[in-house]
Amino acid sequence: MKDSVRKSDWRIVEMPETYEVAKIDRSLSEQEYQALICGFTPRDMDDRWFLYVQDNWVYLHRSWTGHCIFKLKLEISSGKVMLTDIHINRDPDQYRSVNTEADKDEANSVLTSLLSLIRV
């Protein structure tokens, strides 16, 4: 297995104090989980996201600005891996969306896309 991406591998900005908490219900296969914990570092300007896992949280940062847009709670129980909660950046200077359902869809889409790029 390759080394996992760490928070210090990219210039990031922490999730601001202004964020929304919502429920998300996404199960992950063992293969998806292994890819997720490897993380993702952008390879070029077209890669718009930086992803790492720390303390059972998945962090999704915009690669250009470093802003944390989404933070997702990882829960592992009885052999099942789930994403259960999502924190959504609500600082209008960092992220302009205010549509919770669209943001949950965006986070899921970004995760699906990045998981397809990560090589375990």
Image (spheres, grey):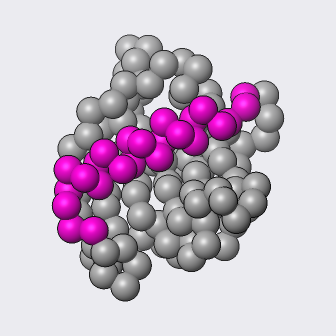
Residue 90 appears in view: yes
82 and 115: which is toward the camera: 115
In the orientation shown, which residue stands out farthest toward the bottom?
Answer: 93
Apparent side of residue 21 relative to residue 9 in the rendered image (left or right): left
Vertical arrangement, residue 118 with respect to residue 70, above or below: above
Residue visible at 36% across and 73% down in the picture: 95
Residue visible at 48% across and 36% down in the picture: 112
Locate the N terminus by quadrant.
Answer: top right
Vertical arrangement, residue 114 with respect to residue 29, above or below: below
Count of numbered badges drawn on the protein? 0
In the orientation shown, which residue stands out farthest toward the right?
Answer: 2
Vertical arrangement, residue 7 with respect to residue 2, above or below: below
Apparent side of residue 2 relative to residue 49 in the rendered image (left or right): right
Residue 12 appears in view: no
In the orientation shown, which residue stands out farthest toward the front?
Answer: 46
Residue visible at 48% across and 41% down in the picture: 111
14 and 96: which is toward the camera: 96
Percent of width and height locating residue 24: 26, 40
Percent of width and height locating residue 10: 69, 66
Based on the picture, tell me whether residue 100 belongs to the magenta stretch: yes
77 and 71: which is toward the camera: 71
Percent of width and height locating residue 39: 64, 44
Based on the picture, tell me whether residue 51 belongs to the magenta stretch: no
Residue visible at 20% across and 56% down in the picture: 100
- Give the magenta range: 97-120
Locate the C terminus by quadrant.
Answer: top right
